[in-house]
Image: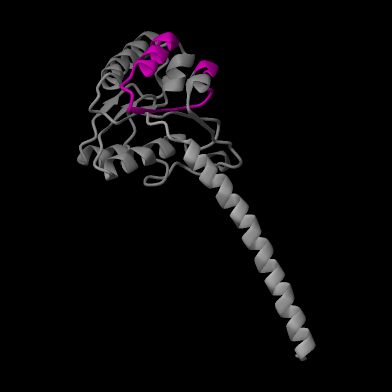
Amino acid sequence: MSTDKQNKTQEAQQKNHDKHQQRQQKVKENVDAKVAAAQAEQGIFQVITGNGKGKSTSGFGTVARCVGHGMNAAVAQFIKGLWDCGERNLLEKAGVPFSVMKTGFTWETQNRETDTKAAQDTWQQAKAWLADESIDLVLLDELTYMVTYEYIDLDEVITAIENRPKMQSVIITGRAAHRRLTDLADTVSEVRNVKHAFEAGIKAQKGFDF
C-alpha cells in the first residue's frame, strides 16, 4: 500500500475513533447525570407482567441476587404450587421461606371456594412478610391472577404494599397486572411472547421450565 493510501486509511480510522469517542462521551454524561439524580434510598416495587415466558424466572433471579448479598427474602407462590419447583428446591436450602398455594392451576381445580381459601391462606403469610422489617425482598409470584379472579382483594394488596417497611422491595409477577398495580410500581417490565416451545408441542422440561 502506498504512503498516500496508508495516510488516508489512518485518517479515516482516526475520524471513526473520534466519532465513537464523542458518542460514548455523551452516553457517559447522560448516565452520570441519571446516577447523580437517583439518590433516593427506598425499597423498590416492581411488577413483571405480559404474556411472554420468564416472569417468574426473573423474579426468582432477583431473590437469588438478594440472598447472594446475605440479605433476607421470602416468596409467596400462587398458581404453580403443586409443581416440583427447582427454584424452591434451591432457595429453601439457602433459608428462604416459602408460602405455597398448593391447589395447582385454577383451571384444573375448578373449585372457587377451595381456590379462594388457598389463596387467602398464602396471602395472609405474605402480608405478614410485607410488615416485617427483617425481610428485604418479598416475591409475590403469580399474584396478578388472584386479583383478577377476585380471590384476593386489590385494595388490600395495595394497602399492604404502600405500608410496607421503607427499605423492603416487592416483586409481583403474572399476566394482566391490574392498572392500579402498574401505576403504583416503581418499575414495570412487560415480557412479550414472540415464540414459545409449548405452542410447538414441546413438553415443559425439568431444569428449564420448572
- How far from the left and from the top, in percent, is residue 98? 26, 29
Coloring applied to the structure: one colour
Asked whether 42 or 90 is in front, the reply is 42
Q: Residue 160 sits in which quadrant?
A: top left
Residue 101: x %, y % from top left: 32, 22
Point 73% across, 76% down: residue: 11
Q: Nearer the viewer, residue 75 or 1?
A: 1
Q: Is 102 part of what is drawn in magenta?
A: no
Residue at 33% x, 24% y: name it: 166
Quadrant location of the C terminus in the rendered image: top left
| Residue 184 shows in the view | yes
Residue 111 visible? The answer is no
Q: Residue at x 42, y 17 (%)?
A: 146
Q: Of residues 180 and 55, which is closer to you in this image? A: 180
Q: Please, is residue 170 above or below residue 112 in the view? A: below
Which of the 4 image quadrants contains residue 140? top left
Q: Is residue 4 above or below residue 59?
A: below
Q: Relative to residue 3, is residue 13 depicted above or below? A: above
- Of residue 126 and residue 183, the one placed in the foreground of this image is 183
Look at 40% across and 35% down and name the residue there. 59
Locate the N terminus by quadrant: bottom right
Q: Which segment did they paint magenta? A: 152-180
Q: Total marks drawn?
A: 0
- State yes or no: residue 164 in magenta: yes
Q: Position of residue 103 (x, y in %)?
A: 33, 21
Q: Position of residue 198 (x, y in %)?
A: 52, 40
Q: Which residue reaches farthest bottom? A: 2
